[in-house]
Image (cartoon, rainbow, N blue to C red):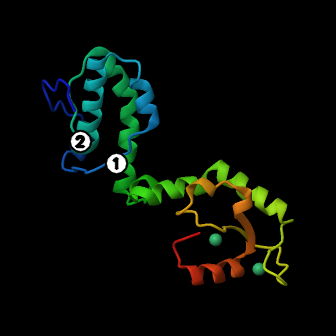
Amino acid sequence: MVGSRTSSTAKTSSADIMSEKIRDSFIFYRSFYQSAKKLPKEDKAELFDAICAYALDGELIELSVVPEAIFTVIKPQLDGVYKNIEKGEAHWNWKGGITDENYRIRQSSEMKEWRYLVFKRDEFICQTPNCFEKKGLHAHHVKEFAKYPELRFEVSNGLTLCKSCHNKIHSKRGKNVN
Ligand SMILES: [Zn+2]
Ligand SMILES: [Zn+2]
């Protein structure tokens, strides 16, 4: 990362609290990228440098006027990240890699929509022969969620199962696939 890191460590009180907390990773929100997108290269580099320095090292660096203004908007989100960690909350972004992505997808409105369409097609009844359960339904991915990302939202790849039938399938298949 390039960028002018002239005078470092003009620390505020919140940075003082964090100064000992050096991190290996942090959440880089799409909104950060969007706010920086239209900046001239130098400002952008400054801003990214400042975000990394603050988020990873708890360090505030001096910025030019425009990056400073944007950084001021972004900073509370970076602070929020620290607060979650300090409270020991397992925010999904912090669980690492692919699992996070999967979790986000599972909670997404697309997935809710997919689930609903699968249930609707199956008339809200477990599809195991002779089961007929209507409560506690799950939408199962016939071809695994993890292995077939292109089929995740494919209604034809979904199957309505009750909880116990779903569990049976997964105890055969292994726990971490859906
Ligand atoms: Zn399943
Ligand atoms: Zn069932």
Residue 126 percent coordinates (x, y): 80, 74
Residue plotted at (54% across, 71% down): 177
Mark 1 crowdedness (10 Å alpha carbons): few <14, some 14-19, many ≥20: some
Q: Element at badge 2? A: loop
Query: From the viewer's perspective, is 77 left or right of 105?
Result: left
Residue carrying label 1: 82
Q: Choose between 135 and 171: the one closer to the eye.
A: 171
**Image quarter hosting the N terminus:** top left
Q: Is mark 2 within 8 Å of ligand 1?
A: no
Residue plotted at (85% across, 84% down): 130
Ligand 1 location (quadrant): bottom right
- Name the kind of residue labelled 2 in the image: Gly
In this rendering, the answer to whether 98 lies above or below 132 is: above
Query: From the viewer's perspective, is 85 left or right of 31?
Result: left
Mark 2 crowdedness (10 Å alpha carbons): few <14, some 14-19, many ≥20: many
Label of residue 92 in the image: none
In this rendering, the answer to whether 97 lies above or below 68 is: below
Query: From the viewer's perspective, is 82 left or right of 63?
Result: right
Proximity of marks 2 and 1: CB atoms separated by less than 8 Å: yes
- Name the kind of residue labelled 1 in the image: Tyr
Residue carrying label 2: 58
In this rendering, the answer to whether 172 lies above or below 101 is: below
Tag count in the figure?
2
Q: Earlier in the sequence, mark 2 or mark 1?
A: 2
